[in-house]
Image: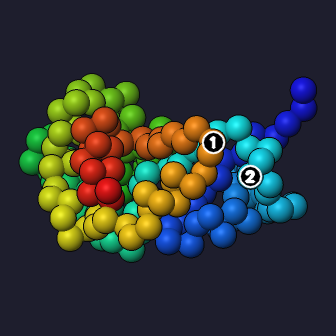
Amino acid sequence: MNFAPVILIFTPPHAPTMVKRACYNEGMRLRQPIHLDKIHCILFDLDDTLYSHNSGLWEQIRNRIQQFMDEELHFPKDEIAELRTRLWRTYGTTLRGLQMEFQVDMDTYLDYVHKVPLDGFINPEPGLKQILESLPQPKYIFTNSDYRHANRSWSCLK
């Protein structure tokens, strides 16, 4: 069976009319309309998709990453931005770079950087529940955040 993997990205409250917006592979454009009856399951990215990328939450988390590198790892403040950029480019995430080069414990890092209040950043999305329930396919949320942060974020949306 030949098929192209498709990840549908819905941006509430415009879904499901946003079905035309899809991501195939990095840099590819939508070639044809997507027919929901041919989709077997739907993957939603939690961060910046089910809640707005303009929420300011990631700015807070970036600040916490900076603080972690300063307060917990004692890197010189004037070197942190450059180090973060290098780690991100080399390893795909700052965390992975810190793990590989500095043996940083993942749980310690994630607990620290996600210790931000979510109220005011993520608010219930009117109609999101109805939109999701109207789609008959199995739905999955994915994120590179840890389980606790994902659960907290999802709870704010309901």
Residue lying farthest to the right in this orientation: 2
The residue beneath circle 2 is 36
Residue at image location 83% in from the left, 62% down from the top = 33
- Residue 157 or 79: which is nearer the viewer? 157
The residue beneath circle 1 is 137
- 15 above or below 137? below
- Gap in Å between the C-alphas at discs 2 and 1? 9 Å
Residue at image location 31% in from the left, 65% down from the top = 124
Percent coordinates x, y for residue 129 in the rendering: 43, 57
Percent coordinates x, y for residue 51 in the rendering: 40, 63
Residues marked 2 and 1 touching at CB (< 8 Å): yes
In the visual, does 132 lie left or right of 135? left
* Quadrant showing the N terminus: top right
Q: Residues within 10 Å of mark 1 (few under 14, many from 20)?
A: some
- 153 above or below 106? below
* Quadrant showing the C terminus: bottom left
Q: Earlier in the sequence, mark 2 or mark 1?
A: 2
Q: Amino acid at mark 1?
A: Gln
Asked if residue 63 can be seen in this view, the reply is no
- Residue 89 or 135: which is nearer the viewer? 135
Q: Amino acid at mark 2?
A: Leu
Q: Residues within 10 Å of mark 2 (few under 14, many from 20)?
A: some
